[in-house]
Amino acid sequence: MDNKTILLVEDNPDDEALTLRALKKNNILNPVTVLRDGAEALDYLFCQGAYAERDANQRISVILLDLKLPKIEGLEVLKRLRANERTRLLPVVILTSSKEEQDLISGYQLGANSYILKPVDFEKFIEAVRQLGLYWLMINEPPPSPH
């Protein structure tokens, strides 16, 4: 499977719907897998638990990661991704409403590729998602899939 999959890790149903709508409005038709908490995201990425049968070679182009997640917070998910050889190079964009400077600093220290504040205004959010999709799905050359 060589589809450029987007992984959306978001627990807020309104933010999930907004993100999916913004992707669709920008004609970003890549498959999107939505995961609703940090534990589910780790299970998916590491092919364990409910996702033990998932193809580990499935190509993920970008992970859109919220910080304020149930079970395991986003920064901890990022930390575990960067600590693992198979997931270390996956592009991770923190997409959050957190304006806390410490979250911003921690996100970059833990290896986030980008940190985007969710705009409150829908039109600004659509534009942010358009640019995000253009860069991460069209321009950026992702790392090779681990074997």
Image (cartoon, rainbow, N blue to C red):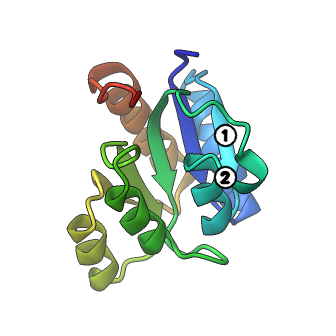
Residue pointed to by mark 1: 33
Residue drawn 27% across and 51% down?
113
Q: In the rendered image, which quarter contains the C terminus? A: top left
| 14 horizontally vs 1: left or right | right
Residue drawn 42% across and 65% down?
80
What amino acid is found at the position of numbered circle 1 in the picture? Thr
- Residue nearest the observer in this picture, 5 or 117: 5
Q: What is the x, y in percent for residue 46?
A: 56, 50
- Residue nearest the observer in this picture, 84 or 16: 84
Decide: is 68 above or below 94.
below
Quarter residue 108 falls in: bottom left
Residue drawn 28% across and 84% down?
102
Q: Secondary structure at mark 2?
A: loop
Q: What is the x, y in percent for residue 18?
A: 66, 49
Q: In the rendered image, which quarter contains the N terminus? A: top right
Q: Secondary structure at mark 1?
A: strand
Q: What is the x, y in percent for residue 103?
A: 34, 78
What amino acid is found at the position of numbered circle 2 in the picture? Gln
| Neighbourhood count class around disc 1 (C-alpha, 10 Å): few under 14, some 14–19, many 20 upward | some
Q: Residue furthest top?
A: 2
| Neighbourhood count class around disc 2 (C-alpha, 10 Å): few under 14, some 14–19, many 20 upward | few
Q: Which of disc 1 and disc 2 is earlier in sequence? A: 1
- Mark 2–mark 1 CB contact (< 8 Å): no
Residue pointed to by mark 2: 48
Decide: is 27 above or below 69.
above
- Residue nearest the observer in this picture, 40 or 12: 40
Decide: is 144 above or below 14.
above
- Residue nearest the observer in this picture, 9 or 116: 9
| 29 horizontally vs 110: left or right | right
Q: What is the x, y in percent for residue 78?
A: 41, 63
Q: From the viewer's perspective, is the residue at label 2 or at label 1 nearer?
A: 2
Residue drawn 55% across and 29% down?
5
